[in-house]
Amino acid sequence: MANDARPTDVPGVVDATDDSAPFLLPTGTVTFLLTDVEQSTIGWETAPDAMAKAISRHYEILSDAVGRNRGVRPVEQGEGDSIVAAFSRGVDAVAAAIEAQTRFDQEPWPDGAHVSVRMALHTGDAQLRDAFNYFGQTVIRAARLRALAHGGQVIASRATHDLVADHLPSGATWRDLGSHRLKDLGRPEVVYQLCHPDLRADFPPLRGLDASPNNLPAQLTSFIGRERELDEVGALVDEHRLVTLTGAGGCGKTRIALQLSANRVESHRDGVWYVDLASLAGTGTVARQVGDVLGVPDDDQRSLLTAMVEHIGNGAILLILDNCEHLVDDCASLVDGLLTGCPNLSVLATSRQVLEAPGEVVWRVPSMTVPATPVLPPIDALGALDAIRLFCERAARSRPGFALSMQNAETVTTICRRVDG
């Protein structure tokens, strides 16, 4: 892959921490470095004062390492105790990661607030949400890649590996960790660990979908937006044992359920199991379909429900029942029996109708965001809206080269409005 990144408007990449210089983000093919403090919540709960000092120092180290290696940090990106940094040259991103991790290892952290940072490197086409921040699949995939890593570890995608293979900093090498499914449910990623004499070398297996029992289906298209929705539904699933996503056909119930489940595979140690009911018809078919997915055989000595309850037992399982609307009564009866008999089971259902089962919490899937006024926003802001992004990505799959422009913006927006986002 050619590294054709170029800063916006003028040559050179300026450190965003330098208030005396104009703020410029590299565009074109960009290498992103994403970081995150592992298990920082525990530190904040047990030693908040020490953690505040440690996190502040951690940001200082990262900002310095990024700036010294010709990188730049977007203004607002990064959530929790994390950052996003962008580099015109992949080798600079690698050097920044090595420098930061080395300094983290040498830092005398306050008692009770040891900071362990995981990092991921990914290279791709950078999309600007505005002059100060990125959006789009490259930075999202980088975040999914970061979720695989452990504190102290630096991993990279194949795109970054190939880009800098012949230009690594002195002493640096790659270790092939194999192919892994990311939590975006898309194509697997060949992952490499960055090795260097100054870096820790041994880590547990990566944390991906492959590390937890599940049958979540791969998706041929990317998941667009819906961050707020995922947070809201995720909070409900964490608090309630039966959550049903409702809404009209095509509003995104299934994709939200699948993505939410992928995000939470590690929270359900005994598996996340997806059951598609769309093609079923007739009484008793729901139980048999669920039993087949869970691996529960027929038994003439007991009912299928009893067999499933015994099979699940105290297992911490998330069961996804998709497309329940034409079998509502059967679904409600089965779910009630399973939840009653299995104390650690949770169920996430999708249906155009509520199940009306005991303990059910209903969440209606909202439309994706579209411009609220007839006057269109600037093209970059328009392209950052979820419904517009979804339309453009799907259109580009049917017509390669399609892109949002001043010429088609009004038509695209009209279509998105007519289908209610």
Image: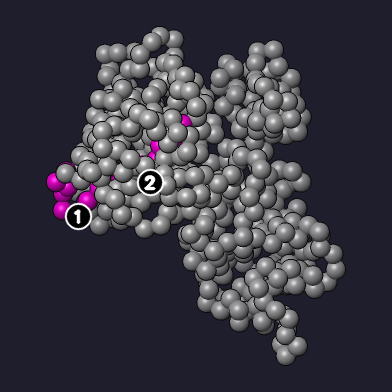
Looking at the image, which residue is at 33% across and 25% down? 71
Over which residues does the magenta segment extend?
107-123
**Above or below 322: residue 385:** above
Q: Which mark is residue 112?
A: 1
**Above or below 13: residue 119:** below
> Could you tell whether 180 is left or right of 299 in the image?
left
- Mark 1 or 2, nearer chain start: 1
Q: Is residue 209 magenta?
A: no
**x and y, in percent, of residue 199 in the image:** 25, 45
**Alpha carbon separation for disc pair 1 and 2:** 32 Å
Label 1, residues with CA under 10 Å away: few <14, some 14-19, many ≥20: some
- Classify mark 1: helix, strand or loop: loop
**x and y, in percent, of residue 382 in the image:** 60, 22
Q: Which residue has dot 2 on it?
A: 175
- Classify mark 2: helix, strand or loop: strand
Q: Residue furthest top?
A: 10
**Above or below 182: residue 71:** above
**x and y, in percent, of residue 122 in the image:** 44, 35
